[in-house]
Amino acid sequence: MYWAVLSHVNENVSSLTIFVVDFDGMAPYTTVVPQIGPFIVQATEQRLAAPKPHLGYETVSPEHFANDPMNVRQEIFDQKAWAAIIINANATALLQQAVETGNTSYDPLGACQIIWVEARDEDTIHAHVGPELQSLAASLTAQFGARWTKQVLQNNTIPNNNLEAAPQALSPAIGFSIFNLRPFDPPVTVPAVTIGLIYLIIISFFSFAFYMPTHMKFLIPAGHPPLHFNQFIIYRWFATMAAYLSMSLFYSFISLAFKIPFNNPTAPGNEMAHNPNAYGAATFVVYWMINWIGMIALGLACENVAMIIGQPWTAMWLIFWVISNVATSFYALDLTPKFYYWGYAWPLHQSKFISPFFNSKYSDKVLTFLQSSKPRALHSSTSTRASVSISAFSSHGRRSTAFSSLSAATSCGGRRKGKKGRRWRRRSGKKMRRREGRRRGCPEAEGQPRGKCHDNLFGSARGVRS
């Protein structure tokens, strides 16, 4: 599974979309025939038609961005594409004016720009997007410079003094300014969004075995009555959540101890910023909550599977769980075969890409959601409670069979209806009470009311049943 993730990279590099937006020839220089913009657009379209591997260049009209290059930046920040090539407004007119007037302040790097967000995926940017775009920029600069020089020298109306005053307007004539909206920095952040996330899986998995002796004490009547079905499910839910809350806090403290910035101000998506945090001074708390929710998603899956399949198969589950999460979170899914697109729903992928370190698109969306959301009542379906109960009691012998059958019968999909169903439920309930009575030495086995058998913490909640 892990090897196959990168088995079709060369074929899938074209899925990394690169916007090509030509603002050349806009008002007020409508009388100048644009040359730079059409030249670059034609070159990218030719490369798109060339054999793979190559990036997926897509020519987009400036009207799509309301004729504003800053809107192009915003869409790159919003991950609508991996990068963008922008031909700045009136690039040809300004170049021609520099040659004709001998403008010494003309800067070729002002003709075009390349936009990307390194923090989106450092490996993909450095391995695929960055190298090809830089190579393309160097090639386009050399080709256009040679063509432009030949064209200018053939024009006898341009004084040689102007060419000597602004040689950069002759060659290279154009250049590409690279804008990295969100650099991936500092380097100590790498473990927090890569290998460190594997520890969330391992910690949450082994916490099941670590706390199992404690959980079993609530099921074995040793000086106290065991918890009932609903009570045990509620206890396990809150106990596991509380354990993950504290463990995720100490895990988050590691990033804080190694001075990963957590209190930098936020920044707009269309501006370059170094280490902005999505939530300002509250970034650490949000980071802690992300790790907590990630542990819940990772850990509860491990716990339920461990209860269902038991030893020694839990080790196989852990291998699958680690590999499937690592394979779909450490590499861009755009480069993987479509089989791996289920990875978008995997917990580790979500934990990585909503990281608050770089004020990324997903952290902005989380912030917007938190600001607009209202308190909502939490509802859980009967069928969900039944499925959790079956897994929770599947490793406790005869007791598990009775509880599982009872919970399945009371679920929405397995409920028996009519007189037969009522008789079946009464018989099941009596069997349950007899078994509990025999274990406790309770006269309930002789048919006495259940509420009179014992006086304990949960007696009032059960009530007296005859």
Image (cartoon, grey):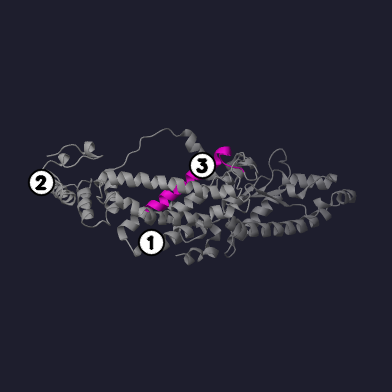
Measured from the top left, where is residue 148 in percent x and y?
A: 77, 55
- Amino acid at circle 1: Trp
In the rendered image, the vertical position of residue 257 relative to residue 466, given as above or below: below
Measured from the top left, where is residue 73 in percent x and y?
A: 62, 44
Q: Which residue is mark 1?
A: 317
Residue at disc 3, secondary structure:
helix
Q: Residues within 10 Å of mark 3 (few under 14, many from 20)?
A: some
Measured from the top left, where is residue 313 in percent x and y?
A: 35, 64
Tell how many labels: 3
Q: Nearer the viewer, residue 216 or 394?
A: 216
Q: Identify the mark nearer the N-term, 1 or 3.
A: 3
Q: Nearer the viewer, residue 450 or 414?
A: 450
Q: CA distance from mark 2 to mark 3?
A: 52 Å
For image coordinates 76% across by 44% down, the residue present is: 94
Measured from the top left, where is residue 128 in percent x and y?
A: 60, 59
Residue 316, by quadrant, is: bottom left
Magenta segment, which residues? 276-301
For image coordinates 67% across by 51% down, the residue present is: 38
In the rendered image, the vertical position of residue 42 relative to residue 443, given as above or below: below
Q: Which residue is mark 3?
A: 286
Q: CA distance from mark 1 to mark 3?
A: 30 Å
For image coordinates 84% across by 44% down, the residue present is: 101
Q: CA distance from mark 2 to mark 1?
A: 40 Å
Q: Which residue is mark 2?
A: 423
- Amino acid at circle 2: Arg
Q: Is residue 57 visible?
A: no
Residue at disc 1, secondary structure:
helix
Is residue 285 shown in magenta?
Answer: yes
In the rendered image, the vertical position of residue 364 relative to residue 125, given as above or below: above
